[in-house]
Structure formats: structure tokens, C-alpha cells
Image (cartoon, rainbow, N blue to C red):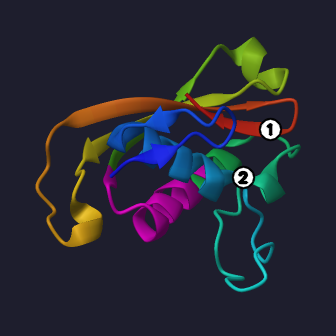
Amino acid sequence: MADFDQRTGAILDDYGSALQSVEIVFTTRLGEMVMLREFGAGLVELLGRLFVPRLFAAFRALVMAAIDIWEPRFRVRRIDLSGSVDEVRLGRAGFNIEVEWRPRAHLGDETVEGVRTFGLTFLDGAVRVR
């Protein structure tokens, strides 16, 4: 499945398309899409709050649920916090997300073709998948 990069217009491969899809899910506020109010992850609503263990648990749960619901080509295996304590204090928290890559899961074929890791960063109020 080919897709286009929403910023540059370049052609994306399947994995790049899935990453872009995840970024769109993570940056969409719940209720923002008029015809699909339940679309999104609820992550943006939590930005700016004091980062405590309960908030980390909430982020993990929201990330896992959003990927499970909206991006079938990934199945989350693990989510780890990345960065130092000082980076977290400055609001530059990030996550490393380990997923099973299932490129044809949206077609009903859940064959795992590998394990991949991508990053999720929060910087200056924006969510980025890298």
C-alpha cells in the first residue's frame, strides 16, 4: 500500500504510511473529526500536566489503545520512556514503542513480518513519531 507524505508529498512505503497514520491518530484531539468523533488518542489533552507515574501509565494505556483501534498494521509489544530525568522535567519526554509489524493486517492477514521500534516525542506542545 503506497501513501503520500502529508508534509512533502513524497511517496511513502507501507511502514512509512503506518507511521504517518499513527502520528495522525496521536495528534488528533478526541471529538475533533466531525464525522468520526471517537477518532484520536487523547494524548494531546494530557500534554502540560505534571509527569508522575500515574500519568505515564495513562499515556501508555492511551498509546496502546489508539494503535490497537486505529492502526491494525502494528501490535504494541512494549513502551518505554526515553530521555533523562532533566529532559522529562523540561517537557521533552519521549517514548520508544516496540511493535509487531503486520503489513497486511488491514486486509485480514495478521502475519507478523518482524519487530520494529519507533519513537514518540513531545516537544513544544507537538507530538512527533520518528
**Residue 38 to residue 73: above or below:** below
- List x then y, in percent, for residue 23: 60, 46
SS under mark 1: strand
Disc sitting over residue 15 in the figure: none
Query: Which residues are drawn in magenta?
Result: 59-75
SS at mark 2 in the image:
helix
Residue position for label 1: 126
Residue 117, image x and y in percent? 37, 30
Whether 69 is among the magenta residues is yes
Farthest residue, direction bottom = 35
CB within 8 Å, label 2 to label 1:
yes
Give the mark nearer the N terminus: 2 vs 1: 2
The residue located at (75%, 72%) in the rendering is 30
For badge 2, the amino acid type reads: Thr
Near-viewer residue (41 or 87): 41
Query: Can residue 57 be seen by looking at this rendering?
Result: yes
Residue pointed to by mark 2 = 27
* Amino acid at dot 1: Ala
Q: Residue at x 75, y 75 (%)?
A: 33
Residue 65 rendering spot, x and y as whole percentages? 49, 65
